[in-house]
Image (cartoon, rainbow, N blue to C red):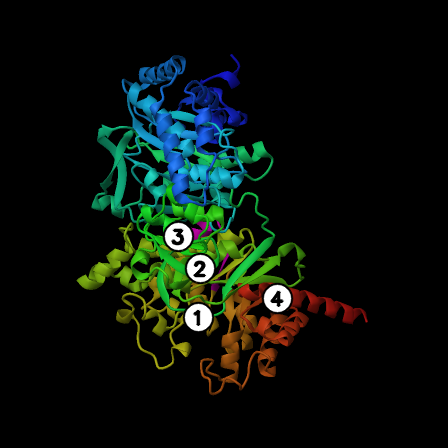
Amino acid sequence: MEKKQEYVLNFEDVRIDDVPLVGGKNASLGEMIHHLKPKGINIPGGFIITAEGYRHFIKEAGLKSFIKKKLSDLDVTNLKNLAARGKAIRETIKEKEFSENLKEEITKCYESLEEKYGKNVDVAVRSSATLEDIPSASFAGQHETYLNIRGKEKLLEAVKSAMASLFTNRAISYREDKGFGHLKVALSVGVQKMVRSDKGGAGVAFTLDTESGFRDIILIDGAWGLGELIVQGEVIPDEWLVFKKTLDKNHNSIIDKRLGKKDRKMVYSKSIRGVKAIKLQKTTNKEEKIFVLTDKEVLKLAGWCKLIEDHYSKLNGKWTPMDIEWGKDGKTGELFILQARPETVHAGRDFTKVKEYKLKKGGEKLVGGASVLNRIATGKARVILDAKDLGKFKKGEILVTDMTDPDWEPIMKIASAIVTDKGGRTSHAAIVARELGIPAIVGAGSATRKIRTGQKITVDTTGSEGVVMKGELDFEIIEHDVKEIPEPETKIMMNIATPETAFEKSFLPNQGVGLAREEFIIASDIGIHPNALLNFKKLDKNLKKKIEKKTVGWENKTEFYIDKLAYGIAKIAAAFYPKEVIVRFSDFKTNEYRTLLGGEKYEPEEANPMLGWRGASRYYSPDFKDAFILEVKALKKARNEMGLQNIVPMIPFCRTVEEGKKVLEIMKENGFDRKKDKNLKVYVMCEIPSNVVLVEDFLKIFDGMSIGSNDLTQLTLGLDRDSQLISKVGNENNPAVKEMIKEVIHTCHSCGKYVGICGDAPSTFPDFAKFLIKEGIKSISLNHDVIIKTTLEVYNTEKELRNSKHD
């Protein structure tokens, strides 16, 4: 018999071009087992009931005419109409019996698994529709999966239930939207040996950043127990980001990891009722406080994900990012790939088109959580806590709920935004919102308590934290076509403070990062004064307790500081790799350091912190030197261990050459030695008149300068830049300031050293930008919101200068 006529096939006999016969999921598994299992990827085997087997069952049971009749007056906009027809079809399918020959083929294949794994072997029964998980059509959780199925009778029930799930409410609605005929789509069922992730862990991986579409990272989510809990949004999973471009070069390419909130897990149920053989169970205190995977396991899994993406990209002749499910067997400790399907949201996107959403004015924050997409939406909230109230939802409202499941999809697609209390970035709500292009905030915690039905709100997901604010706030959408923006000779670089926005901002035209600030990472991701971590054992109980809460997942408190800072730096460096990313060491003032947890214990009160203990003078001070060494170690981890050699460290507010030498010596003692690492450069900020007066002396010990025009203007003119009273006295266009800058640019050129400027002056004052270009500035670093406007202005200025020379 030809393959296309078979009712049951082994996974080993199936390839990706068998989608019409076995559906997207099963075809992909067969493809991977054949091509990628020999390369070392663990994939559990099993067998498939084909689409032909499904059609045979439907025909023999006389169901075709029944289904056609039931759907003849279908109205998907009427939820009661949809639910009634779907339920009737599903129940009728479950009542029918398989033909003897189909039943015999299924049981024979199960017996083969029993011979290999033992009597009543546990299997997963997964549906795979013939128009599901293909590049043009993919949707989260349309059809059912049944786990821990044991014995022939339970298997036959589960297979039939999986087939019936072709007519779930959301699957019917989806096919109507896509224009797929309900009787033309068939459903194949895969039967796989269960991976004992109930005793280990499981999760999801994407071979791109799910929010921005940035292609050079692998996002891995994981939780204890069976993976369905992550998709359902019942837990906030652990999360890792792995950088692809250094993964094959024996680096520790994990550029971020975050401990989730894993307070429960899905495990096997002892009492099997019907085909439901799983239950929810509370995790232990220890499980909540540790990561599901070790770094070594994460890198192994990421390597597999990259192999899978590479295989499918080659197969399709274009970049094919993948959505992958994985499991870790708690009995053997082995990792497995359970499923892989093409990601469809970003795969076909034109990355030369960049949309920016900008609030015109901020508002009062109600709740915050993890952002999905970079959008802003406004509207009336509709709080729904029970599926029975779905009929109350109106088009354009903002859905606020505890969590969603596939039954909610008909209303999710008419929402203007979605906010959930539970879930992470790979939960059902996040996946569906992403596919629909709807902004969502997941894991908001208290949204259903703090937001009322009918309340007008704004959902802003443009930052690392999604924020819900009171009222319908005004915002604008700016669309850019990157292809149409010319590239000037002057390098246009970007200022980046928030690592979470770096991937999205990397799509803007740029030549790298002229200023990556550490302050945001320290304030937001760490939030603890470094000296409090260094002296943790000597702290009082109350402060210790607060720090313990913030550092869950890290036993060594200083390692927490190093890792978190390194991850923040690495995300920025990875986003712009291999372009230069200039990372400035921390430049907090004493009053800013005091706001960190434990800061009041270690920071003096100064009358004028702007001119006090900041920058280089901190780094060699006995009261801060050890804290600075943590920063050096973090930068070294990102640059050397993670392989991000495009990082260039920069020292801020260096008053004297002697200070510079002391700081460089500390860096050398802790692994930053320019004699040993010939690619390493160290820059200094030029923001104090002494940097200009002694510019040649500073350039003898540093590889270049970045002009901090704000501080240089302030100190040249004796201004307090925060004072309204004297704000009109001068700015960067002042002749004294320009003379200073001119001197620095020319001297850097004559010494063959780098010179750039970071600040908003070139975009604020067009004449100042012209001055910089005329004097030969090498790079101008800008905030992202003015980068396109200023790039065009710089290009035109260069053109004018060239023309004037010819004239």
Q: Counting residues from the N terminus, which is met first, the one under dot 4 or under dot 1?
A: 1
Type of the residue with mark 1: Glu
Cα gap from disc 3 to disc 1, whole angstroms: 64 Å
Cα gap from disc 1 to disc 2, whole angstroms: 37 Å
Type of the residue with mark 2: Gly
Secondary structure of residue under mark 3: loop
Residue 778 or residue 404, whichever sits in front: 404
Residue 81 or residue 765, whichever sits in front: 81
Type of the residue with mark 4: Lys
Q: State the mark number for residue 789.
A: 4
Q: Counting residues from the N terminus, which is met first, the one under dot 1 or under dot 2?
A: 2
Q: Counting residues from the N terminus, which is met first, the one under dot 4 or under dot 2?
A: 2
Closer to the eye: label 1 or 2: 2
Closer to the eye: label 4 or 1: 4
Q: Residues within 10 Å of mark 4 (few under 14, many from 20)?
A: few
Q: Which residue position holds label 2?
A: 463
Cα gap from disc 4 to disc 2, whole angstroms: 22 Å
Q: Residues within 10 Å of mark 3 (few under 14, many from 20)?
A: some
Secondary structure of residue under mark 1: helix
Cα gap from disc 4 to disc 3, whole angstroms: 42 Å
Q: Which residue position holds label 3?
A: 393
Type of the residue with mark 3: Phe
Secondary structure of residue under mark 4: helix
Q: State the mark number for residue 659.
A: 1
Is residue 100 positioned above or below 786 on the image? above
Q: Is residue 254 visible?
A: no
Cα gap from disc 4 to disc 1, whole angstroms: 38 Å
